[in-house]
Amino acid sequence: MIGHADARAVIRAALRAPQVAALLQGQAADPVLEQAFQAQGWLESGYGSGRARNNWGSVQAGHGPPCQPGSVELTDHHKDGSPYQWCYRAYDTPTVGAADMMRQVLRRPWMEALMRSGDATAIEGGLRHVHRAPFLGAYLEGPHNYALGLEKRAAVIAETIGEPVYVVRGGGQRPKSAESGASYGAALAVAALVALVVVTR
């Protein structure tokens, strides 16, 4: 697995990729968004270090074998532990793989606000809203496992690269540049709504 500082460089490059920038609709990335996606990439795949080359989000190809070019066959497991074969996407570079992870998340219109909120519980809730997020990896089997995984990894990332912990269950610190503006207010509102849905289910 690559180091956390190198992973942050990949995250920043991926956020500038045209397909990701278009989904952000001109809104600048901020440290919260960077930390949230980095924690997600580590949780899902160890920064794309698995057998599915550079696949930061454990993004599935949408079908079983035979796998087409640009994907690889891997063994996955059902909830009961029984194995099955499935195709996962593979990417030429870490940046391309990280960008596709981001695209898979941000093409759901509610997810940008949740990622920007830094609320790991709300992020998990938003992913569960999409049919339990079949487009991402296997960390959604138990309630709140994903949020806890994001929180733990964000803490290590923050300590390693020397920044505040922005991604925690319930929301963390905010960089001063992000504490005002409509986008932050919208993020808080959406995060609070999704967190409420998660808690009351």
Image (spheres, rainbow, N blue to C red):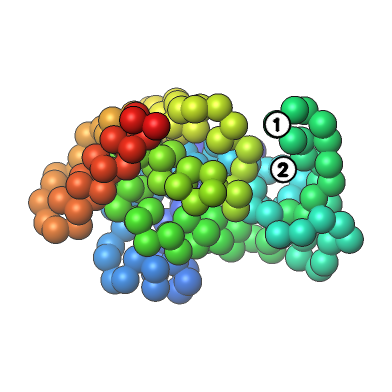
Residue 50's disc is 2
Where residue 194 appears, as percent x and y from the top left, is: 32, 42
**Is residue 57 at least partly visible in the picture?**
no
Q: From the viewer's perspective, is 35 left or right of 55?
A: left
Name the residue type under label 1.
Lys
Structural distance between the alpha carbons of marks 1 and 2: 21 Å
Viewer-closest of 30 and 168: 168
Viewer-closest of 108 and 173: 108
Depicted 169 relative to depicted 133: above or below: above
* Residue at the spot 47% in from the left edge and 55% down from the top edge: 105
Q: Quadrant of the N terminus?
A: top right
- For label 1, the residue is 79
The crowd level at tag 1 (other Cα within 10 Å; few <14, some 14-19, many 20+) is few
Where residue 54 appears, as percent x and y from the top left, is: 66, 53
Residue extending farthest to the left is: 180
Depicted 149 relative to depicted 27: above or below: above
Residue 181's disc is none
Mark 1 / mark 2, whichever is N-terminal:
2
Q: From the viewer's perspective, is 103 left or right of 134?
A: left
* Residue at the spot 39% in from the left edge and 68% down from the top edge: 23
Residue extending farthest to the front is: 201
Depicted 21 relative to depicted 198: above or below: below
Name the residue type under label 2.
Gly
Numbered disc total? 2
Task: Name the element at disc 2.
Answer: loop
Where residue 163 appears, as percent x and y from the top left, is: 31, 35
- Front: mark 1 or 2: 1
The crowd level at tag 2 (other Cα within 10 Å; few <14, some 14-19, many 20+) is some
* Residue at the spot 43% in from the left edge and 39% down from the top edge: 124
**Is residue 189 at least partly visible in the picture?**
yes
